Amino acid sequence: MTKLKGILLTEGMHGMISQVEGLAKALDLEFIHEKIELNNFWKLIPPSLTPAKEFVFKNKIEKKFDIVISCGRKSVIPSIYLKKKYKNKIMNIHIQDPKVSLDNFDLIVAPEHDHLEGKNVLKSKGAIHYLRENELEENKNFLKSKVNKEKLVTLVVGGPNRYYDYNDLIIDEVFLKIRNNFINKGYQLILIPSMRTPKKIIDKAKRYFDENQIIIREVDKKAYLSSLKLANYIVVTCDSTSMISEAAITGKPIYVAQMPARRKNYRFQKFFKLFKSLNIIQDLENSVDNWNYEKLDETNRISGYIKKQLKNYDFS
């Protein structure tokens, strides 16, 4: 059977790519990425006030796909435009709240903590993502040669955004808790950066921790997967619900390194409350517990529902 073809529309940020690519893989699509760029002042106009016209965006998209999966504000209008143009010959799926009428999309995938309601809304616990258990197993030994202790803790570091700052004082506090709670108790550290992690934080970690700790300097998917599989504990900085959701596929205890918010962060607080109620996360404080929870794989659950809807479309 010929695979369906997908086009993935995002602004190019890791969290968005992880979600659209994860869903595309779970749907077993042949897919391509399209980084959306808007024209002129349309960059400043919210989607709700923007016409669904081709002149709004720079990208020239040909009909070589069956399913559009979009994520992020800039991708909303291109997805709506393509749906209006090709109608029932394509399915368009948007991830996150598009901030426009939900009727513009066949399906919306939104985190449960966003409280988005609609007949075409599929709610996920946390963010869907591209990680698969078999990939974790396949890459388990990638970092094995660097490991010299039985007990391991992985620290996944994000970066500054409009909600959280990453000043020296805050990072010092996170590193101190890692040292006191884990390294001083016989754990070896694996530090994993993200695309948003400033180089100065990696340099700081190299100075702060002894040479026995594993500091990954560049974004490396294999190292990331290996670290999640090898770790006894996972610590994730609080600035990324996507990274916390990804870690939850392991079923391992996840500590969230909280930081002071520089603006109201209601969505984050709702997410933390949900994941605490599911016994997935705890805040990183001054002691360490051990707990279990059912591995969270929302991407496969969501894709299973979508697959049942595909028969309603004329992909020709």
Image: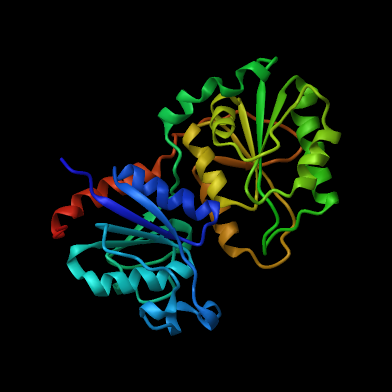
Q: Position of residue 143 (x, y in %)?
A: 61, 23
Residue appearing at x 25%, y 74% in the figure: 85
Is 160 displayed left or right of 48 in the figure? right
Tell me the quarter of the image containing the N terminus. Answer: top left
Q: Foreground: 220 or 243?
A: 220
Q: Position of residue 239 (x, y in %)?
A: 64, 53
Residue occupying image coordinates x 35% and y 48%: 24
Given residues 48 and 235, the one toward you in this image is 48
Q: Is residue 128 visible?
A: yes
Q: Based on the displayed image, in which of its 4 quarters is residue 207 positioned?
A: top right
- 180 sits to left or right of 13: right
Query: Which of the pair 287/116 is nearer the observer?
Result: 116
Against 22, is 212 above or below?
Answer: above
Colour basis: rainbow
Total number of numbered labels? 0
Q: Residue at x 46, y 24 (%)?
A: 137
Corner quadrant of residue 181: top right
Identify the image quadrant of the C terminus.
bottom left
The answer to whether residue 203 is above or below residue 77 is above
